């Protein structure tokens, strides 16, 4: 269900929910730049959780990253499910921000760079853990 859009300044109903300027009072309605849902999804595809960081939610990105790694370590299917969910979530969150359904969050480039560094350390840790699990699972006594 879509809620009717009203001007926050004068209170009149807007003709279009995508209006940038109120036709009645002339106040600018959209002050935030739009997030690109495609870029958010591509970021999450390239680096699991980076799309969430692009959308301004670094904590959620770290949770997606950890969920993917743990899911891949235990079984492949749960890790892939979390990975695909991360792509979907990044895309939908950017669309919802653009539609003003959820609060807009700024993209912090420093957080994105630090997250990619964390991602690489996570990959290294994942392979070390996988090697340890394999050593115990396939140990010949």
Image (spheres, grey):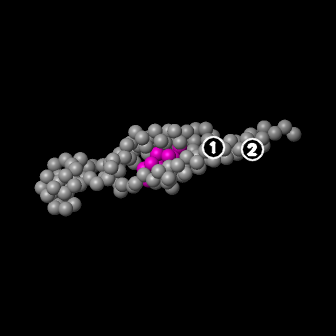
Residue wearing tag 2: 132
Residue 74 in the image, given as x and y percentages of width and height: 65, 43
Residue 73 seen in render: yes
Q: Which mark is residue 85?
A: none
**Foreground pick, 90 / 111:** 111
Residue 49 among those drawn in magenta: yes
Tell me which corner region of the image, top left, top right, bottom left or bottom right, holds residue 10: bottom left
Asked which secondary structure carries label 2, the reply is helix
Earlier sequence position, callout 1 versus callout 2: 1
Residue 9 among those drawn in magenta: no
Residue 13 in the image, given as x and y percentages of width and height: 16, 55
Q: Which residues are magenta?
A: 48-56
The span from disc 1 to disc 2 (Cα, nearest Å) is 14 Å
Left or right? Give the position of 115 relative to 88. right
Residue at screen point 84% across, 37% down: 140
Left or right? Give the position of 133 relative to 77. right
Residue at screen point 52% across, 49% down: 113
Residue wearing tag 1: 123
């Amino acid at each position: 269900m879509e809620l009717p859009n009203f001007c926050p300044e004068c209170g009149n109903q807007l003709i279009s929910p995508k209006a940038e300027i109120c036709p009645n009072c002339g106040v600018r309605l959209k002050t935030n730049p739009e997030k690109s849902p495609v870029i958010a999804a591509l970021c999450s595809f390239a680096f699991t959780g980076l799309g969430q960081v692009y959308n301004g939610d670094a904590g959620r990105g770290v949770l997606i990253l950890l969920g993917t790694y743990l899911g891949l370590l235990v079984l492949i299917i749960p890790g892939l499910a979390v990975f695909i969910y991360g792509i979907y979530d990044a895309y939908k969150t950017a669309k919802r921000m653009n539609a003003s359904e959820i609060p807009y969050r700024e993209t912090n480039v420093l957080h994105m760079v630090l997250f990619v560094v964390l991602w690489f350390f996570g990959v290294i840790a994942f392979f070390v853990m996988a090697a340890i699990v394999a050593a115990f699972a396939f140990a010949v006594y």
